[in-house]
Amino acid sequence: MTPPTDKALAVAAEQPRWMAYVELTKLRVSSLVLVAVGVGFCAGWDGAWSAAAVSRLINTVLGTALVAVAANALNQLFEVEHDRKMDRTVGRPLPTCRLNALEVVAFSVTAVVVGVAYLAVTVNEVAACLAAMTFLSYVFVYTPLKRTTSMCVLVGAVPGALPPVIGWAGATGGLGFEAWLLFAIVYFWQLPHFAAIAWQYREDYAKAGYPMLAVIDEDGTRTSLHVVTHTVTLIIASLLPALYGFSGVAYGMGAVVLGLAFLVCGVWFVSNKSRESARFHVIVSIIYLPLLLALLLIDKV
């Protein structure tokens, strides 16, 4: 077991205890999840925007938020030994012993049970079941796979792409074809996004023993192929709403422009294969997805 660095312990010691629970939630990751839920709901809602509709949207987001933070917390518990070996995660609540395993389990179980129940009562059973599936697949399928295969990202992208489907189900009570178009967009967006993150922190992943593609692909050939092919697939997926009449011409044109810009950035990243180009590609990907989804909603309105 590698102990946390003195610097990580010193920083942790200065923070109030409640901050440890905040860190468990991975707010930046969770915020993207909630944006996707909101987009899915708004895309699926066809009625008037009354107070009841807004309340239903808020309930869908809140319930999903509880499930998301529960998954993030339990994920950190299962990966604590690996987090101790990585510079970017050594300061987390468990490696620095600010929280113990029992506290994290209690926090996670409470959040997921309350979240799923809240969705079932205030929204509908379909959204609740999807949220439960997201939690289970992320924590008990994707998390263990990270330690065994580089293909884990293909599995992990499934729970990562379910939030807009949860939002759609929250709005409609069912699972329309359009919901799966949103799923496809978010699914294929994650693959080049996480490839860039893995390349940026490839030394960290190697120290922790994760067989990520960026670690086992020493010359970057497979990573380059992964980024380019999945970005092209993402562009195709992003055009499907326009092709199937779910959105209009304005969205289709915008999706082409955004997609080609994202592809150019991806090609630049894999051409340089530097930490800086990887970080830039991560930033671009975080800008790309909200812009694309916002364009979809604007065009729908």
Image: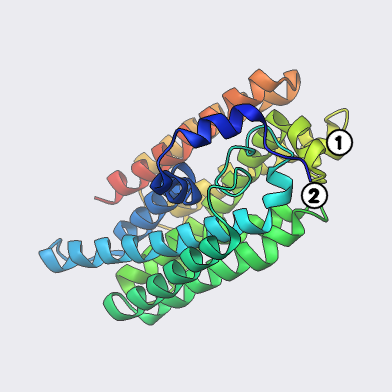
Residue 10 vs 94, above or below: the answer is: above
Depth order, front residue of 39/87: 87
Q: Residue at x 62, y 67 (%)?
A: 137
Q: Position of residue 279 (x, y in %)?
A: 61, 25
Residue 274 vs 86, above or below: the answer is: above
Q: Which mark is residue 217?
A: 1
Q: Residue furthest left?
A: 51
Earlier residue among tags 1 and 2:
2
Q: Residue at x 88, y 27 (%)?
A: 219
Q: Residue at x 54, y 72 (%)?
A: 133
For mark 2, does the 10 Å Cα neighbourhood hold few (<14), some (14 to 19), or many (20 or more) residues?
some
Under mark 2, the amino acid is Ser
Residue 148 vs 176, above or below: the answer is: above
Question: Callout 2: helix, strand or loop?
Answer: loop
Residue 126 vs 10, above or below: the answer is: below
Depth order, front residue of 245/75: 75
Number of marks: 2
Quick check: marks 1 and 2 in contact, CB under 8 Å?
A: yes
Which residue is the site of mark 2? 150
Depth order, front residue of 144/153: 144
Under mark 1, the amino acid is Asp
Would residue 195 appear left or right of 213 to someone viewing this image?
left
| Residue 249 in view here | no
Q: Residue at x 70, y 32 (%)?
A: 201
For mark 1, does the 10 Å Cα neighbourhood hold few (<14), some (14 to 19), or many (20 or more) residues?
some
